[in-house]
Image (tube, rainbow, N blue to C red):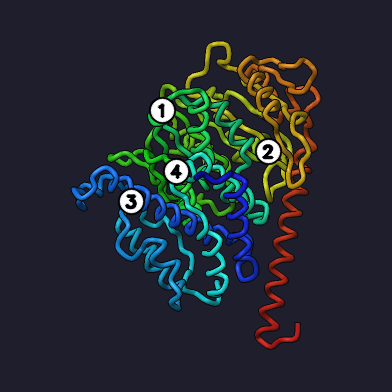
Amino acid sequence: MTISQQHLESRLWSAANALRGPVAAADFMTYMFPMLFWKWISDTWTWEHEQAVADFGDALNDEIEADYHRFDLPEGTHWNDVARSTLPNLGARIQKALDKIAQANAEKLAGIFGDAAWGNKERLPEEHLRNLISSFDGLNLNPDEVSHDMLGQAYEYLLKYFAEGAGQKAGEFFTPRQVVRLLVRLLDPQPEETIYDPTCGSGGMLMETINTIRARGEDHRTLRLYGQEVNLTTSAIARMNLYLHEIEDFKIVRGDTLRAPGLRNPNGTLQKFDVVIANPPFSLKNWGRDTWESDPRAFCGVPPKDKGDYAFIQHMISSMDEERGRVGVVMPLGALFRAGAEGSIRTCLVEKDLLEAVIGLGPNLFYGAAIPVCLMIFRKEKVEERKNKVLFIDATERVKTGRAQNELGDDDLDAILKAFHDSEDPDGEGGVSLRLVDLSEIEANGYDLNIGRYVAGAEAEAVDVTEALATWQEARVARLAAEEAMIHQLKVAGFDA
């Protein structure tokens, strides 16, 4: 008997609340996702075992049964063997079970359970751990009870829930799904193509390419997905996300994409992909400039040490296929007009006729980041009518004010997509303002890509102030938090603060 989506999400909400108190909201996912994945593996393993028994009966042996299982579950590591035990030191036994499962499936699951300190009772008291387990225990996550689509939606539900409570950390693992959907559809992935996200977070952009192909009634299984993510927990979440959606043809590597790109050919060169898509960290400081002076990815120049935006852009362009490659990237609006090294790189990219479109979306679309953002689309081979031109689109009027952050609806996405593909406002009422601009005009403007220079009604120079104010506010919040932590430590040390 299947359960409803609402019931599943309600139980997951209850599980997350079991962590409230000793665990900070931003760290809920460190415990929740491994627990969900372990329960799913265990319930699915039991379901597969029952299928094998039904098919072979007394003739069943270990060799035959192994073919039924996606993952090997060593003896004593099943959820029922550990989580339902009343023995003490539950966290330590969970840690041991998860380690054994990862070791038994080293090629697929190495490191997938992250680095949660299950045995640390100060960080997660056993009472809270047992409450967490109790919330999951009543759920049966086998395929008969919960489809992969339902489980995937529940996973997305958790990601959004954690993003709302994570503040500035949210951008490390969650990009709003409307923005992801828009960017993927702009790049139009096709069956049999390779898709790469160099800052893949929780895997949302890779998953959306799958969803896009499925929605068109095409075979998503021919896609090959690749990603890199620097954060251990987040890279594990991405892999779990794909497995829970029944996607297995993927490769997610962990590491710093700018300092040590992990997807290379045997000869050491970067792998090339049909679609390269990302929402990299905005204006990343200390991104590794010292290693880029001789890096072939710096084909248009070396970005400033305190802003890594154009390092990510050049890495992505260096990673796209030489014939049909295209790149879609989320950028802070300042990347369109900041001077200095970034201005030189921007000039080079435009002169090489790699930039196809700039789409302004406005501020407050992302958790923990109020600055205005845009989408930049690069293409190796433009269609004839767009060669030596750049399409500028101001879609800020299509963005609606929301509770936690601003939003794009399905009708807004459709309007922006139609404007991009047809080079005209779909409703003729200024909801999407756009213009196809010759490179000669951009050159005359000093290769400043500020949308307001080319599209009537779009904000121009004021956006730099908006970005500066938003950055100041985020820095102020971080400073206050640091001061509070320092005062606490002084009090603990016996100083009168």
Q: Quadrant of residue 484?
A: bottom right
Let me know if residue 229 appears in the view. Answer: yes
Count up the numbered dots.
4
- The residue mark sitting in front, 1 or 4, is 4
Answer whether labels 3 and 2 touch (C-beta < 8 Å). Answer: no
Query: What is the secondary structure assignment of the residue under circle 3?
Result: loop
Residue at mark 2: 373
Decide if residue 369 is on the left or right side of residue 95: right
**How far is mark 4 from mark 2, CA to CA?**
42 Å
Residue at mark 3: 71
Name above or below for residue 208 compared with residue 160: above
> Which residue is located at x 76 percent, y 28 percent?
452
Which amino acid type is shown beneath numbered disc 3?
Answer: Phe
**How far is mark 4 from mark 3, CA to CA?**
18 Å
Asked whether 227 or 141 is in front, the reply is 141
- Label 3 crowd (10 A; few <14 / some 14-19 / many >=20): some
**How far is mark 1 from mark 4, CA to CA?**
32 Å
If you read the primary sequence from the N terminus, does the residue marked by circle 4 or circle 3 appear first? Answer: 3
- The residue mark sitting in front, 1 or 2, is 1
Name above or below for residue 186 compared with residue 482: above
Image coordinates for residue 312, horizontal then vertical, percent: 52, 41
Which amino acid type is shown beneath numbered disc 4?
Answer: Asp
**How far is mark 1 from mark 2, CA to CA?**
28 Å
Which amino acid type is shown beneath numbered disc 1?
Answer: Glu
- Label 2 crowd (10 A; few <14 / some 14-19 / many >=20): many
Residue at mark 1: 193
